[in-house]
Image (tube, helix red, strand yellow):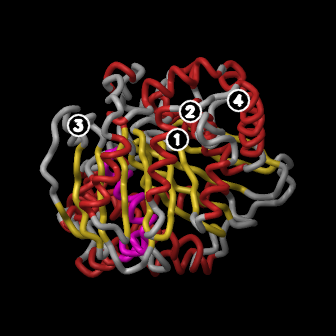
Amino acid sequence: MRLFKKAGQRSRPRSLQKAGAKVAEHRLDNGMRVLIAERHSDPVVAVLLFYGVGARNESEREAGVSHFLEHMMFKGTPAIGKGEVDRITTELGGQNNAFTGYDHTAYWFEFASDRWETALDIEVDRMKNLALDPAEFASERAVVLEELAGGEDDPWRVLARHVEDKLFPRHPYARPIIGFPDTLHAMTPESMRDYYERFYHPGNATLVLCGDVKPKAALEAVRARFGSLPAGKPFAEADCPRPPLEEPPGEVRLETRWDDASRRLVMAWRTERVGSEADYALDLALGTLTGGRMGRLQRRLVLDGSFATSVSISNDTRVDSGAFWLFAECAQGVDPAVLEQEIDDELRKLATTKLDAREMKRVRSFLRSSEAYDGETVSDLAEELGEYAVDYDWREAFDGGARHDQITPTMLRDTVARLLVPSRRVVGWCLPLAEEEAVAPPKKAKRRKKVRRS
């Protein structure tokens, strides 16, 4: 659910508070959303401009264009030449960067509070005047291709990419955000400009100002620069068609090989959209399984059991769907099948037995502390607000754990039983090229520890 107003409508500001910041939303007449988070604890302002476009919005032939365009946004306009964005930022003592996701792309600056409006001058210029010089385009394509090739040197990334391909068949979520060599080679400045004009305009933009600002003056500064720009093509007309995501037909297993001795495991389940009840329930599942040293899998596999050298989980919910990821590296001398059995046993317990009050309290405290940490800096807070705003609803970032508190032990158990089952998952193993090591089962002492903990 996205709570967007149509272009031409101006909403009354609604303010909420988070991490010491008072936040209000405004709309320009051209549809541009502006979130102003006032926090005067430090003389710093973060300026983040989000566009509601990412890899999800690319057609198959455009795969990788969102990320490539992110690079080109730093390559100049007629007014601000190549390298000038970084030079200006450095001279003013600030920082800048950008990132591309499946559902949004964002550009951020952090400046002292007496010079942050420079970020607005840069952003409005490249929103309407991006050069896309052919020579710079060719040069930067080589950089992106090198980045893509570098990813092929990471066994975890390669394995996860193969798993994701099976998890979201035919959907853009199955493709790597960076794209493919053939789609990158086929891109032209003209095809990128078409994409830029479809999505990079005020009607598809959310600007977040966070930190030591005066809200009224800040809004006027934004309106003076962006208010006269046209809204742009409606999102429904600019977006590409996507196939519906259907229920998985059964467990899918795959295997890759790598020239080292490690045995890497990636399990993934397709889940539900960001902001759904299942999204919050799976946050609690994550906390239960790998939330700190008391996480069930952390204790069972790593701290006590010696089945794995590491284990981690990510609840990766997105606009169209989500993925629940589990990553583990098998300990040397342990049969990979045994590691899987240990994980399956713990998931089975979570799907059949309700957490007691003490463990629910621990998990909720873990999630609250993680959320508090995410709001420590103005840039972190601005990023969280912008991502919530574009992907779901920014007000959800302010619930103070209320949605998590609404998830009962029964709801958590039932969500795991419905979604995190073998018949719905993709299991990927990265195994050594040469299987020379004799694989032995875990020692009996370790097995007794496991039984005692249960």
The mark that comes first in sequence, 3 or 2, is 3
Query: The disc labelled 1 sits on which kind of residue?
Result: Val
How much space separates mark 4 and mark 2, taking CA atoms? Answer: 12 Å
Main SS type for the magenta part?
A: helix
Residue 137 is labelled as 4
- Secondary structure under the numbered disc 4 in the rendered image: helix
- Secondary structure under the numbered disc 1 in the rendered image: strand
Q: Nearer the viewer, residue 375 or 122?
A: 122
Q: Which residue is mark 2?
A: 130
Query: The disc labelled 2 sits on which kind of residue?
Result: Leu
Give the image location of residue 166, x and y in percent.
54, 33
* Count of numbered labels shown in the rendering: 4
Determine contact: label 1, label 2, CB under 8 Å.
no
How much space separates mark 3 and mark 2, taking CA atoms? Answer: 23 Å
Q: Which residue is mark 1?
A: 426
Query: The disc labelled 3 sits on which kind of residue?
Result: Asp
Whether 384 is among the magenta residues is: yes
How much space separates mark 1 and mark 3, taking CA atoms? Answer: 46 Å
Q: Which residue is mark 3?
A: 29
Magenta-highlighted residues = 369-391
Whether 79 is among the magenta residues is: no
Name above or below for residue 75 compared with residue 58.
Answer: below
